[in-house]
Amino acid sequence: MNFKITGTGSYLPNKILTNQDLSEMVDTNDEWIIQRVGVKTRHVAEEESAEDMAVAAAEKALEMSGVSASELDLIVVATFSGSTIIPSVAGVVQQRIGAVCPSFDISSACSGFIFALDTAAGFFERGKAKKALVIGTEKISKFVDWNDRNTCVIFGDGAGAAVLEEGDGYLSSYLFTKGGNDVIEIPAYGGISPFDKVEHKRSTIFMNGQETFKFAVKAITSDLMKVVHDAGLELEDIDYIVPHQANMRIIQYAVQRLKIPQEKFFVNIEKYGNTSAASVPIALDELNRSGKLKKGMSVAMSAFGGGLSSGACVLKWYI
Ligand code: UT7
């Protein structure tokens, strides 16, 4: 027995940053950003923390599922941008929503939500959880170098969540890590030891865009083919694909390579940019609330990014 998703939720911070706003901060323009990335606006947190956004998304997912926080057996949060290193974001969420269950964070950058779902799947498999909450939340804006046009036009803040309950809605999954890679990195998190003789490194995102792009297009196509096959399905059996919203051109590449109609790929990058671990659950929630997903449909999700890492899974939709 594994899980099925019974509720989704998401939260985007109130402040919207447009391409025009960014063109007043760095040497960029609306046309370049739309053509090369596909983003028109992104939300940035002014007052909200990663924890605040996670709680807001979680409350919506719990409300949809009808599960109360006190019933949860597990909370897993995918993030790298919590307010504190200790306690974990999941611990703060647990306390604020009134849950009593093991709660912990996992860090796998943009593919974090897929890693978190698979982690939760293990608890269901072992009979350790009947109801769980999985969240992706990121306040990336605090790690962005807002003078670096290579990265600041891409990212945005937000959170997405899913409530999982016992069921047979998790058909297959695949996780991949090519560790120790400096293609995308945030070299430091803060913290200074008086004994440290090592030079202090910056705490802003560096991304080799083209290397990441190459990794991403390979990952999205091969991971999706693998999980669809492992679920005993063909690509044409998949009703919707929820990809990590990293770059519209990566999604278009996958459309061409996999020969899946573009309408099957749910895309909202133009509104929110790349929200890292929050990207897939925000998109899943938006697709779910659009009413397009019907009970019994097959949904594939795919994410890739820092680590380098990637992951994908296939769900049978039960809501
Ligand atoms: O979520 C984690 C995973 N991340 C990804 O999957 C991201 C993958 N990579 C990408 O999405 C793309 O590589 C980027 C969007 C980051 C960059 O697009 P690109 O097509 O690879 O551009 P580039 O880095 O090759 O730069 C092309 C040109 C350069 O100018 P020159 O050297 O040709 O004169 C850049 O300086 O575009 C210039 N450029 C910009 N121009 C205007 C770079 N950033 C900007 C900008 N505005 N914001």
Image: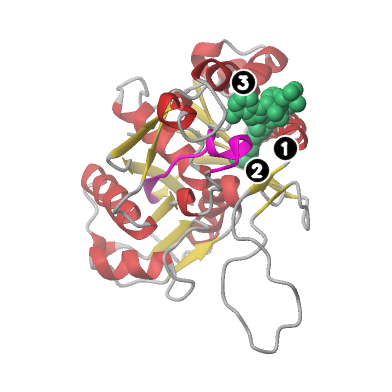
Residues packed near mark 2 inside 10 Å, few (<14), some (14 to 19) or many (20 plus):
many
Residue at which label 1 appears: 212
Q: Is residue 44 left or right of residue 141?
A: left
Helix, strand or loop at disc 2?
strand
Residue type at numbered disc 2: Gly
Q: Position of residue 301 (x, y in %)?
A: 55, 34
Residue type at mark 1 is Thr
Which secondary structure, mark 1? helix
Tell me if mark 3 has few (under 14), some (14-19) or many (20+) residues whose alpha carbon lies within 10 angstroms of its own: few
1 or 2: tag closer to the N-terminus: 1
Residues marked 2 and 3 touching at CB (< 8 Å): no
Of residues 127 and 80, which is closer to you in this image? 80
Which amino acid type is shown beneath numbered disc 3?
A: Arg
- Residue tagged by mark 3? 36
Q: Which residues are magenta?
A: 147-165
Q: Quadrant of residue 303?
A: top right
In primary-sequence order, the first of circles 1 and 3 is: 3
Does the closest atom of ligand 1 sit within 8 Å of the Cβ of label 1?
A: yes
Would you say residue 188 sits in the magenta stretch?
no
Task: Look at the image and name its color scheme.
Answer: secondary structure
Q: Circle 2 is placed at which residue position?
A: 305
